[in-house]
Each structure stands twice: as C-alpha cells, then as structure tokens.
Image: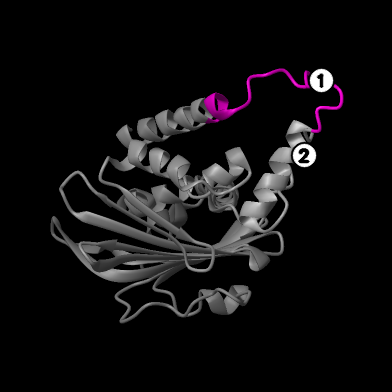
C-alpha cells in the first residue's frame, strides 16, 4: 500500500512539474513580424537538436513505462480470465499459484519500470532531473538513476531493511521486448523478460521462491516461471530448482509448446478449458 501511494504521489508531482514548466503566455500573442517561430514548432526544433530526431506527438514507442504497462495490462486481463475459469476446476482452483507468478515477492524490482521514460512521455524528450525527482519521490532521497540509449537504465536505492537494490533494464523498440535484472546487495535476485508476440506476449521470471513445505517450514528453490498467451488462450509454467538462468527469449518468438516443455507445474487454457499438471496431478 505504501509503495502504491508513493507511485500516485510521484505521478501527481510529474504533472505538477510539467504544468509549472510550461509557457503560461497565451498562444498567438506575438506581434506580427517579430521573427519568432511559432511556439510549438520552436519547441520541436529545439528537441530535435538535443535528441537528433523530431518529437512526434503521441509517439510513445521506446518508452519503457508505457510499453511495460501495456504488457502488464494484457497479462492481468489474461490472469483474471484464468482465475474466473478456474473456479469450476477442482485442481486448478486449488493449485493455480504453483504455476503463476507471485509478483509481491519481486515487486521492488519491477516497480521502477513504472517510471522509466516518464519524462519523454510528459516532455517529449528525456530529462534526467525530471526522472530523478520521480524516482526519489517513490524510492527515497538516496536513489540514483543513470540512463543510456544503448544500455538502458540503472536505478539504485535502499529498501526498508537497508539493503541496496539495483535494477538494470533494457528495452528493444523493434521487437517490443524488455530485459530486467534485479540485484540485492550485489547478488542477482531477479531476471525478467517479455516479448510481444502475435495477439499477446511471452514472458519469463527467474528468482528464488517457495517450492514446498517441510511441515510448517517453507522450502525455497531457484525457479523459472513462464507465461505465453494470445488473448484468452495461453499457458503458465514453473520450473523448480533450476541450475541456471533460462535462455533469453529476446530476439526470437518462443514456440508455445516448447516454451513450457519439461515444466514442474503447468497448465494450458484453450477456449476456457484446462489441461496440465499441477502438484503432480494431471488433468
């Protein structure tokens, strides 16, 4: 809840800064023959000089926050559909979480994606100071942000327990794909990738999570979660106790069948009907 509140406050701050930074003089008040360019054209010319490319209104290709949220919206819609259909399925309703990502555990690594590129969205070009204010409002005054067009973003901040969180994210516009690496005190804690496919997305999450219980004691293991969907049809899978990172899905569209092949837990939904194996129970 606290994180959600800080995001709302940061977004409000963004719009406030954008409003304060705008020209408050009514358009069209320049005297004839002043020799000044029209305000809109002048602004675009200046941005073209700074970025090397003209700014197009509404062109949000390459903005991480915009494209990540598009992925997230589609994923949540698919997840909601799966949950609704699972109510009538005894095995899936009881064991759905065995194959689906619990984002609460990895939220601190994913949240920075919500802010990356927001200055471009608001101002039409990247502004380091603008974005730093947003990140520091959300994650604390010690937050550091670096950005490079080729290597992407690096965001560092401290969590509530004093650990150093570092998030590296690179977005590829040509394929609408993203790779994120999250570190805690220098140790890799999360690898997340997604890529757009025809009618949907494929994604994978690689991190340490609970795989079972010894009486009441949770047992953790390194796992890879995979999700691939087109509209309401798709698959979710979890590979337990993996030895290494999964092969990257960037640069190629995964085959739906082979993408989840060999998973410890998995399910596929097609036209509202389930097949799969969760907790050793096939259906």
Q: Residue at x 72, y 44 (%)?
A: 44
The 10 Å Cα crowd at callout 1, few under 14, some 14 to 19, many 20 or more, is few
Q: Which label is found at residue 222?
A: none
Q: Secondary structure at mark 1?
A: loop
Q: Secondary structure at mark 2?
A: helix
Magenta range is 18-35
Q: Nearer the viewer, residue 180 or 89?
A: 180
Q: Which residue is mark 1?
A: 31
Relative height, residue 280 to residue 38 (above, below): below
Does 241 sit left or right of 255 as displayed? left
- Report the colour scheme: one colour
Q: Nearer the viewer, residue 65 or 214?
A: 65
Marks 2 and 1, Cα distance to the nearest angstrom? 17 Å
- Quadrant of the image containing the N terminus: top left
Locate residue 33, reporting x and y percent.
Answer: 86, 27
Mark 2 or mark 1, whichever is nearer to me: 1
Locate residue 53, reporting x and y percent.
Answer: 70, 57
Q: Magenta residues: mostly which secondary structure? A: loop
Q: Residue at x 46, y 80 (%)?
A: 247
Q: Is any part of residue 129 visible from this angle? A: yes
Q: Residue at x 76, y 21 (%)?
A: 27
Q: Which label is found at residue 41?
A: 2
Relative height, residue 274 to residue 135 (above, below): below
Q: Quadrant location of residue 253?
A: bottom right
Q: Nearer the viewer, residue 251 or 91?
A: 251
| Residue 279 among those drawn in magenta | no
Locate residue 124, reporting x and y percent.
Answer: 63, 44
């Amino acid at each position: 809840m606290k994180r959600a509140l800080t995001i709302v406050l940061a977004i409000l701050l963004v719009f406030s800064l954008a409003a304060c930074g705008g020209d408050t003089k009514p358009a069209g008040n320049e005297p004839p023959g002043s020799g000044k360019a029209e305000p809109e054209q002048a602004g675009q010319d200046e941005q073209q000089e700074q970025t090397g490319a003209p700014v197009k209104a509404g062109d949000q290709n390459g903005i991480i926050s915009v494209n990540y949220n598009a992925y997230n919206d589609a994923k949540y819609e698919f997840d909601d559909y799966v949950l609704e259909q699972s109510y009538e399925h005894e095995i899936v309703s009881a064991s759905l979480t065995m194959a689906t990502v619990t984002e609460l555990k990895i939220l601190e690594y994913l949240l920075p994606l919500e802010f990356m590129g927001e200055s471009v969205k608001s101002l039409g070009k990247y502004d380091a100071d603008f974005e730093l204010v947003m990140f520091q409002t959300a994650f604390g005054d010690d937050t550091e942000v670096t950005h490079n067009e080729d290597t992407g973003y690096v965001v560092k901040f401290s969590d509530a327990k004093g650990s150093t969180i570092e998030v590296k994210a690179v977005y590829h516009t040509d394929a609408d794909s993203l790779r994120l690496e999250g570190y805690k005190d220098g140790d890799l804690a999360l690898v997340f990738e997604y890529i757009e496919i025809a009618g949907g997305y494929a994604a994978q999450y690689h991190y340490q999570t609970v795989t079972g219980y010894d009486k009441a004691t949770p047992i953790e293991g390194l796992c890879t979660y995979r999700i691939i969907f087109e509209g309401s049809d798709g698959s979710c899978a979890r590979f337990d106790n993996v030895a290494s990172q999964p092969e990257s899905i960037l640069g190629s569209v995964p085959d739906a069948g082979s993408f989840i092949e060999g998973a410890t837990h998995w399910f596929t939904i097609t036209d509202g009907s389930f097949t799969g194996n969760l907790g050793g129970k096939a259906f």
